[in-house]
Amino acid sequence: MIKKRILWIDLARAIGMLLIIIGHIPNAFSEFTYNMIYAVNVPLFFILSGYLFRVQPYAKQLYKLFYNLILPYLFTGVLMLLISEFVNNFWRYGGLISGGSTKEMLAKIFFAVGTNTNMLMTGFHMPSIGAIWFLPALFFSSIIYNFLMKTIGKYKQGFYIVGVITLLICALGFLITKDNATIILPWSLNAAFIGTFFLWIGALIHRNYFIKRHMIIFSILGLIIWFFSSKFGAFWLNRAYADNPIIAVIGACGGSYAIMGICYGLEKITDVNGWHRVMTLIAIYGKDSLIVLCAHILDLNHTMSSFYITREFASVPTIGNMVLILYRISITVIAIILFRFLPVFKNIYYNRQYPFKFQKKFTNVNRQEKN
């Protein structure tokens, strides 16, 4: 059974994905603007996941996380590998980019990190897979958070004890990333540690009636915090690094809440007029954010679109940046349309709606055993 979508959450996801795409446009904005974008574009997704989080049996959670996060990650990684092999061995006409040799691509898929870096205490080089590092990071942070909630959260005041623990785990994520990502763990675990606290923040927002009741006030406050925190430097969650970690986390929470509050308000306002259909259409972009992310990284890492568009609009770079943004959005929209109808693609990227046949059999067997 597929749960009913929450419009404002999908709107927030859509904004988050647009910020990710815009953030990947090089040399288009001021340093401060990039700081604002990166302060929230990924933390927002952790916080939204925490808002929707429900404690689950370990086996059930692993099953769902594997099919909703890890399988799409691996499949996208294989597509990146195949494109690279094609370019390395056959393609000689430009337009496409290889991600490296077979060995390099397999290393990228295995290590699942968001920036080129070295493994903790070894100096072993781990090449970056790109923006889909977020998927394994959310996988591990969700497992950690679910474990804490099942073991500690069930007790009186346990939820707030979990909050303290996730804050300590978050601090650990920053501490073991030294000198701007020269020491880091594989599988984006550094980012996952930080993301665990953002999951708790999302859950706190969901269960705190006072915060939700005064959403307008807290949204304005969040905007102010987001704005001023961005003046204190950058926050690169993919590296688990911030110029000022404490301010970065506060700014990420404030900015994410502001976006959530704005989207919540948009849903309520447009419920009573003709704009509701427009909001529903925009929300599709957030609902299918997994496809948007994976299609975007394929375009970003393996096509020369940025080079060609930038070259064509070299004399008017502002227009060139706008064209590049619209182009990249259009690529992801095409992917949303196509992936739903392509065999295997729809089973992987729309697994909730189109599970594999063996998944249905597995689910039916489990139900029979329970009965």
Image (cartoon, grey):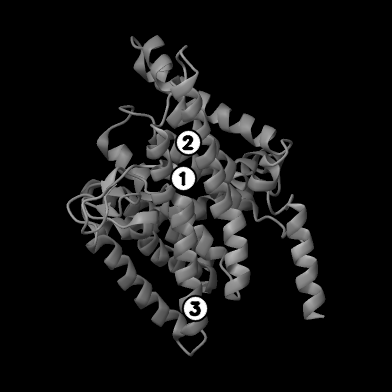
Q: Earlier in the sequence, mark 2 or mark 1?
A: 1
Q: Which residue is at 37% across, 12% downward?
A: 311
Judge by depth and name the residue closer to the eye, 365 or 200.
Answer: 365
Q: Which mark is residue 331?
A: none
Q: Position of residue 269 (x, y in %)?
A: 63, 49
Q: Is residue 180 left or right of residue 103?
A: left
Q: Nearer the viewer, mark 2 or mark 3?
A: 2
The residue under the point 49% across, 38% down is 18
* Residue for badge 3: 149
**Residue situated in front as seen by the camera: 336 or 301:** 301
Q: How far apart, in angstroms, are the residues tagged by discs 2 and 1? A: 7 Å
Image mark for residue 132 = 1
Q: Position of residue 137 (x, y in %)?
A: 43, 56
Whether residues under marks 2 and 1 lie with C-beta atoms below 8 angstroms apart, the answer is: yes
Residue 141 visible in this rendered orientation of the protein:
yes
Q: CA distance from mark 1 to mark 3?
A: 26 Å
**Disc 2 crowd, CA 10 A, few/some/many (<14, 14-19, 20+):** many
Which residue is labeled 2 in the image?
297
Camera-nearest residue between 83 and 140:
83
Q: Amino acid at mark 3?
A: Met
Task: Tell me: residue 369, above or below residue 36.
Answer: below
| Residue sitting at x 35%, y 77% | 164
Disc 1 marks which amino acid? Ile
Question: With respect to residue 355, does 79 lie above or below?
Answer: above
Residue 246: quarter of image: bottom left
Residue 317's place in the image compared with 58, above or below, is above
Q: Which residue in the rendered view is the most extreme toward the bottom?
A: 156
Does the residue at mark 1 contact the one at mark 3 (Cβ under 8 Å)? no
Kindly indicate whether the residue at mark 3 contacts the one at mark 2 (C-beta within 8 angstroms): no
Q: Horizontal and vertical percent for residue 151?
A: 48, 84
Spatial CA distance of label 2 from label 3 is: 33 Å
Q: Earlier in the sequence, mark 1 or mark 3?
A: 1
